[in-house]
Image (cartoon, rainbow, N blue to C red):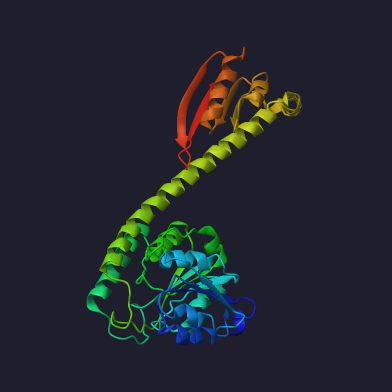
């Protein structure tokens, strides 16, 4: 894949008791020339998985072991923190997915159209074996719930195959320890405005006799996680917006206080434009009224407009102290898109 010469793919593979498929799966991954790194996290397996992992000497392979079992989400959190390439993907340690299909999933990112690409098992012209009915129904219910909470239209939220840029990884913190990673990841990338694509992939699903681990209890937990993560992310975004607004107000107050020390400069400006300030003046962004006070000496009437409620208080104080002010009126005139009320103070 020539377009990936400069941009390789880091794959993270969580492992828990996968001795029957692990070796073949790793070899399948390493055959892909676009794979620059394979981070394998053994989540305290009790079978021969860890012994198998000791035999790999390929420089692209990094093996990490948890001292105790913590769950798939925790293993992914550990592995994602060890990735080094510009694009990151998730690979299970079974043989349900074909690593060669990452090549197709990478294309929307490489051409600059997407930040995240999901591989859908249900929106595909590719071959797949017949799935367990209730397992399929559960997947679709979880995807529907996730779409309702995030206002996107994925067909397979629970898919293992996801690729995303390092920018996405740097913006996320994986908090779920078990199978809640998929809904958590989906909610966060959707609500944070990343560009999401979805492409069909093949699927060779396992039965429970063949080692499939996820069950109906995990489905219930995933549903709860969809709701919990959506509410949590919405609250975080509101808090962040409030903090940004508070920071902006503090910065504005500092700037205005500094500007208020420049009365000589404002007087010089007023002298330059005094021939045009003999009638009525509309001052936009009046701040705490420092320049308004200067303009009131020249003009017959000044409309001082200030969108910050905090500065309007200071503007009113300035107006009250003006000897040239015969009357004062304050009223709401409009609202900005961010709901910051705009107050107009009239000096007559």
- Please give left or right for residue 298 compared with residue 108 in the image: right
- Please give left or right for residue 29 compared with residue 129 in the image: right
User: Residue 191 in the image: x percent, y percent?
Assistant: 43, 57
Q: Is residue 204 above or below residue 245?
A: below
| Residue at 59% in and 83% down | 57
User: Residue 20 in the image: x percent, y percent?
Assistant: 40, 85
User: Residue 295 in the image: x percent, y percent?
Assistant: 66, 23
- Please give left or right for residue 269 compared with residue 53 in the image: right
User: Residue 165 in the image: x percent, y percent?
Assistant: 54, 68
For this rendering, which residue is in front, 140 or 40? 40
Q: Quadrant of residue 277?
A: top right
For this rendering, which residue is in front, 302 or 98? 98
Quadrant of the frame with the N terminus: bottom right
Q: Is residue 203 above or below residue 258?
A: below
Q: Quadrant of residue 304?
A: top right
Q: Is residue 108 above or below residue 28?
A: above
| Residue at 53% in and 71% down | 64
Quadrant of the frame with the C terminus: top right
Residue 210 seen in this snapshot: yes
Q: Quadrant of residue 248?
A: top right
């Amino acid at each position: 894949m020539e377009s990936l010469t400069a941009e390789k793919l880091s794959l993270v593979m969580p492992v828990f008791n996968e001795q029957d498929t692990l070796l073949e799966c790793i070899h399948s991954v390493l055959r892909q020339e676009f794979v620059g790194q394979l981070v394998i996290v053994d989540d305290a397996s009790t079978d021969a998985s860890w012994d198998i992992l000791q035999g790999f000497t390929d420089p692209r392979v990094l093996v990490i072991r948890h001292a105790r079992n913590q769950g798939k989400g925790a293993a992914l959190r550990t592995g994602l923190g060890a990735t080094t390439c510009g694009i990151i993907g998730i690979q299970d340690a079974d043989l349900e997915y074909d690593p060669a299909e990452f090549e197709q999933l990478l294309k929307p990112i490489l051409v600059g159209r997407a930040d995240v690409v999901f591989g859908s098992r249900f929106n595909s012209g590719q071959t797949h074996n017949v799935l367990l009915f209730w397992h399929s129904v559960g997947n679709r219910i979880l995807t529907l719930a996730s779409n309702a909470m995030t206002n996107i239209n994925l067909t397979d939220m629970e898919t293992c195959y996801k690729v995303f840029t390092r920018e996405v990884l740097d913006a996320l913190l994986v908090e779920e320890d078990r199978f809640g990673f998929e809904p958590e990841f989906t909610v966060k990338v959707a609500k944070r405005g990343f560009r999401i694509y979805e492409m069909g992939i093949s699927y060779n699903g396992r039965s429970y006799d063949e080692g499939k681990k996820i069950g109906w209890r995990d489905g219930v937990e995933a549903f709860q996680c969809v709701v919990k993560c959506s509410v949590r992310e919405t609250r975080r975004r509101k808090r962040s917006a409030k903090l940004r607004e508070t920071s902006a107000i503090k910065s504005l107050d500092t700037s205005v206080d500094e500007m208020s020390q420049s009365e000589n400069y404002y007087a010089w400006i007023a002298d330059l434009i005094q021939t045009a300030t003999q009638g009525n003046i509309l001052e936009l962004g009046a701040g705490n009224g420092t320049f308004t006070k200067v303009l009131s000496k020249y003009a017959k009437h000044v409309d001082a407009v200030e969108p910050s409620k905090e500065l309007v208080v200071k503007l009113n104080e300035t107006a009250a102290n003006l000897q040239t002010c015969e009357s004062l009126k304050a009223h709401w005139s409009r609202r900005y898109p961010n709901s910051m009320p705009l107050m107009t103070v009239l000096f007559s």
